[in-house]
Image (cartoon, coloured by chain):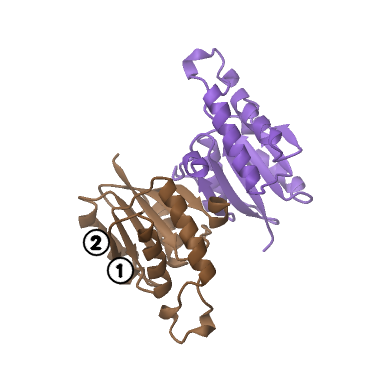
Chain colours: A purple, B brown
Amino acid sequence: MSTFNLYLIRHGLAGQHGDYENDRERPLTEEGKRKTRQIAKRLSELDLQFDLILTSPLVRAEQTAEILQEVGLSKHLKEAAYLAPGGNIQTWIDWLEDWKASEKSLALVGHEPDLSTWAETLIWGNAQGKLILKKAGAIGLTLPLSGSPIAHSQLFWLTPPRFFTA
Amino acid sequence: MSTFNLYLIRHGLAGQHGDYENDRERPLTEEGKRKTRQIAKRLSELDLQFDLILTSPLVRAEQTAEILQEVGLSKHLKEAAYLAPGGNIQTWIDWLEDWKASEKSLALVGHEPDLSTWAETLIWGNAQGKLILKKAGAIGLTLPLSGSPIAHSQLFWLTPPRFFTA
C-alpha cells in the first residue's frame, strides 16, 4: 500500500498563561526559541523535508513553524485555523484529500492535547490520551495515500525533545 | 499516579534465515553489531539506566542485550523464555508484579511482531499492527506501578534507529 509521511510537531516552550491577556498571543520564551531551533536543526540533519508546513495561527505555534522553515525544512508554510486548540480533524482530512494527490510529506505544528488526539485517531480510530507529546516533541505517522487515514495509519516515530537533542 | 519506565528494544540486524539450520542460532551480522553498539552508546549518553535487562534466549537478541550491558546500561541481564517469538505477555506480567515492587526501570530485548504487539496491548488493550519497530529500534512506555498495565500504559518514545544515530 502506498503511504505518505505526516509529522506532528508541538510548539516549543512558551510564556506563562497568566502573563498574556490573550492566550493566542503567548510567544515562545528565549529558551523555547533556542531549544526549538536545536530540534529544527536535528530534523534537518536527518534529511527531513516537508512539502508543506501547516501551522496553528497562535503565536507560539507560528514562531515554531517559522523556525522549522528558517533551517530549510520546507519552502512552504501556511496557517490553518483548524490547528488552533480544539480544531476538528475532519476539516483537515477534507483538505488533505486534494493535497495528497500531488504532495507527499506534510508537517503540522500545533497544540496539545489536540496533536496526540489526532495521532491516536489516525492510528486507532479514537483517542484515549495514551501518547505523551512534550513541547517541541514530534510524532511521525505513515498514512495511506488512498482512502480515509482514520484508523488506517501507523506510528513510526514519537520523540521527547530530550531524547532527540542530547 | 506513580509509574515506571519500560523500554522495548528490538534485536539488531541478523544473518539471513536460510543460512542457519536453527533460527534461534542466527547471530547479528558485523553491520548489525556495529549499529547496535552505536545505538547502545546513544542510549547511554541519554543517561538511561536499566535496573534489569530481560532478553529473549535467541542468539540475535542475547547478543543485542550483551551489547547494551557492555556499554553500562545495566548491571543485570537475564534470559526470559517468554521473550522468544510468540511469547505470552501474561507470563511476563505475572513476573512483573513481584519485580516492580522494588525496581523501577526495565528493558526487554526481543522480536517483532511480538514487541510492538506487547506495546499496543499495554497502551490500548489490544494489538492492530499499528506500531512500526525497526531492527535495533526502541519503544519507551510508562506503566502504572499498581494494577494491571494492560490498557493503562502510555507511550512516550518510539524511534527508528536512523533517527536516533544520524
Q: Is residue A77 above or below residue B87?
A: above
| Amino acid of disc 2 | Trp
Q: Nearer the viewer, mark 1 or mark 2?
A: 1
Taking A87 as reference, is A154 above or below it? Answer: below
Counting residues from the start of the chain, the first of labels 1 and 2 encountered is 1
Give the numbered dot on residue B95.
2
Q: Chain of mark 1?
A: B
Name the element at disc 2.
helix
Residue plotted at (63% across, 52% down) = A149
Q: Quadrant of the N terminus of chain B?
A: top left
Q: Name the residue furthest bottom.
A: B21
Q: Position of residue A102 (x, y in %)?
A: 79, 50
Q: Is residue B81 left or right of residue A120?
A: left
On the question of residue A48 being in view, the answer is yes
- At a point 52% along the width and 41% down the height, the residue shown is A165
Q: Are circles 1 and 2 on residues that touch, CB within 8 Å?
A: yes
